[in-house]
Image (cartoon, rainbow, N blue to C red):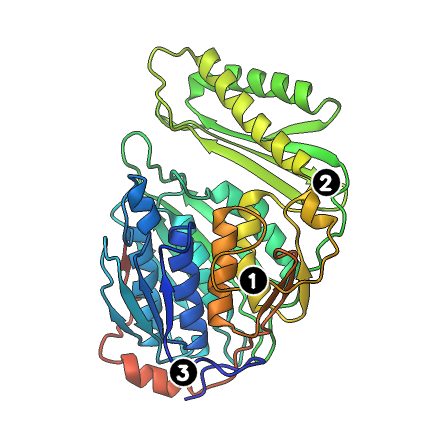
């Protein structure tokens, strides 16, 4: 069966990944399963999140990983083993390509505050390659947590990631229906997305990325804290920003009541004269006992502004979180892309092709792990100069007969989309 077309044939033998090599934890699983579903390459992952387990944060699959796998398995009629929370070893073999998906109105529901955004990140590359003859958009609705620890928030995805992906030719409409929190009493939220898949026979475009950072033109501030803290929080951020980024325009984009003392979230997004965006946020994860509103506000303002200042001074063309999230799109795209994460990499001119037998290159553990995983699925993919340059695989989806997909899943298909439970 023809499941795709790119510069190299898909791998017939399973790709084996050892989770002890990758420090990115769930990043390894999300990218590996997404690319396996796109390319049809069988994949085996063992020792999943083993490094996280050693640090006391629990190993194996988390709920959001299981959710992603279940949807991708259903969509591709895949053979899957050990897909359950806590599993440390999985196998995945897709039998249908993205362009054969039948349901284009996808609903993923959760009975927990598992991260909506991590599920969205894992499914987006696959759904971008799920084009049909008519170029029909895909509607995706996800319930779960929109403000969750160790996960990107909806605001970060909305203000930083998706605007940056537009440089690859990716268009995603998004709407936050309600917030979901992992802090305080459990609250389930919901977000909706409308995704325009890449036209059949075309790869993602290499990004039109600026070659210089330029200067900071403005900083947007979003604050979601209890109503009683709005005044002190606004005052603290304005004071800290005036000290660290004097004469830079600032604007309060959102000031919202979180309705719970344990729900404290802020995000700063800096815009540059060359069109870049840098985001830094914090979902407060410390004890607030015996702290006044002023003390909490000052603590949050100092930490988030300091983080943004560190990102800016680092001299790269992308913040640390965005750097890691863009790698799978660089790998899938045609042509070359240059997105340095630091001044050292930006000013480098080495032309050495990196070894890909383990995580490598510039950036966070999530970034180094992402490069390694993409290289295992695309052997002809090249990363140059610590990942400063990516020579993409240029993967394209081709037209296939949808009738085969309908027949393969007819036993479980119903008129209304079957929710996938987190």
Task: Judge the density around disc 2: few (<14), some (14-19), many (≥20) Cα neighbours within 10 Å.
Answer: some
Q: Nearer the viewer, residue 300 or 350?
A: 350
Residue depicted at 63% across the width and 47% down the height: 341
Disc 2 marks which residue? 272
Q: Answer yes or no: do the residues labelled 2 and 3 have beta carbons within 8 Å?
A: no
**Viewer can see residue 275:** yes
Front-lying residue, 108 or 88: 88
What residue did someone put label 3 on? 12
> Whole-Å distance between the Cαs marked 3 and 1?
23 Å
Residue picked out by circle 1: 329
**Disc 2 from disc 3: Cα separation:** 45 Å
Toward which corner of the image does residue 120 lie, by quadrant?
bottom left
Query: Label 3: few (<14), some or many (≥20) within 10 Å?
Result: few
Q: Earlier in the sequence, mark 1 or mark 2?
A: 2
Q: Specify which label sits upstream in the sequence, 3 or 1.
A: 3
Task: Tell me: 211 left or right of 17.
Answer: right
Residue drawn at x 72%, y 40% is: 272
Vertical relation: 193 (above or below) 148: below
Closer to the camera: disc 2 or disc 3? 3
Q: Position of residue 45 (x, y in %)?
A: 33, 64
How many circles with numbers are drawn on the protein?
A: 3
Give the residue displayed 46% in from the left and 42% down from the top: 153
* Residue 416 position (above or below residue 256): below
| For discs 1 and 2, the disc positioned in front in the rendered view | 1
Q: Is residue 417 above or below residue 242?
A: below
x and y percentages locating residue 136 in the rendered image? 51, 72
Secondary structure under the numbered disc 3 in the rendered image: loop
């Amino acid at each position: 069966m023809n499941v795709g077309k790119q510069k190299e044939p898909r791998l017939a033998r399973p790709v084996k990944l050892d989770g002890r090599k990758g420090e990115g934890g769930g990043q390894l699983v999300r990218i590996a399963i997404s690319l396996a579903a796109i390319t049809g390459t069988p994949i085996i992952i063992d020792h999943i999140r083993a490094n996280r387990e050693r640090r006391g944060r629990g190993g194996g699959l988390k709920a959001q990983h299981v959710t992603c796998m279940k949807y991708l398995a259903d969509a591709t009629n895949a053979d899957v083993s050990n897909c359950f929370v806590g599993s440390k070893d999985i196998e995945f073999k897709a039998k249908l390509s993205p362009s054969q998906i039948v349901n284009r109105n996808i609903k993923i529901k959760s009975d927990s505050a598992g991260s909506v955004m991590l599920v969205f990140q894992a499914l987006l590359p696959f759904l971008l390659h799920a084009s049909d003859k008519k170029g029909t958009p895909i509607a995706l609705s996800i319930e779960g947590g929109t403000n969750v620890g160790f996960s990107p928030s909806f605001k970060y995805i909305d203000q930083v990631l998706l605007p940056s992906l537009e440089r690859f030719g990716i268009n995603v409409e998004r709407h936050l229906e309600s917030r979901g929190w992992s802090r305080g009493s459990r609250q389930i939220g919901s977000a909706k997305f409308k995704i325009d898949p890449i036209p059949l026979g075309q790869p993602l475009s290499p990004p039109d990325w600026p070659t210089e950072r330029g200067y900071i033109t403005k900083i947007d501030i979003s604050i979601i804290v209890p109503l009683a803290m709005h005044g002190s929080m606004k005052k603290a951020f304005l004071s800290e920003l005036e000290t660290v980024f004097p004469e830079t325009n600032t604007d309060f984009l959102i000031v919202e009541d979180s309705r719970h003392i344990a729900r404290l979230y802020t995000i700063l997004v800096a815009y540059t004269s060359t069109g870049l965006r840098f985001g830094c946020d914090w979902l407060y994860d410390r004890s607030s006992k015996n702290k006044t509103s002023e003390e909490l506000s000052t603590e949050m303002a100092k930490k988030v502004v300091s983080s943004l200042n560190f990102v800016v001074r680092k001299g790269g063309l992308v913040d640390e979180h965005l750097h890691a999230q863009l790698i799978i799109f660089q790998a899938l795209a045609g042509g070359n892309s240059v997105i340095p994460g630091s001044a050292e990499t930006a000013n480098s001119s080495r032309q050495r092709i990196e070894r890909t037998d383990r995580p490598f290159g510039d950036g966070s553990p999530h970034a180094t792990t992402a490069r390694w995983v993409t290289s295992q699925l695309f052997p002809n993919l090249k990363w140059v100069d610590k990942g400063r340059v990516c020579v993409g695989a240029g993967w394209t989806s081709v037209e296939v007969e949808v009738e085969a997909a309908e027949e393969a899943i007819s036993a479980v298909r119903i008129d209304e989309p079957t929710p996938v439970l987190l």
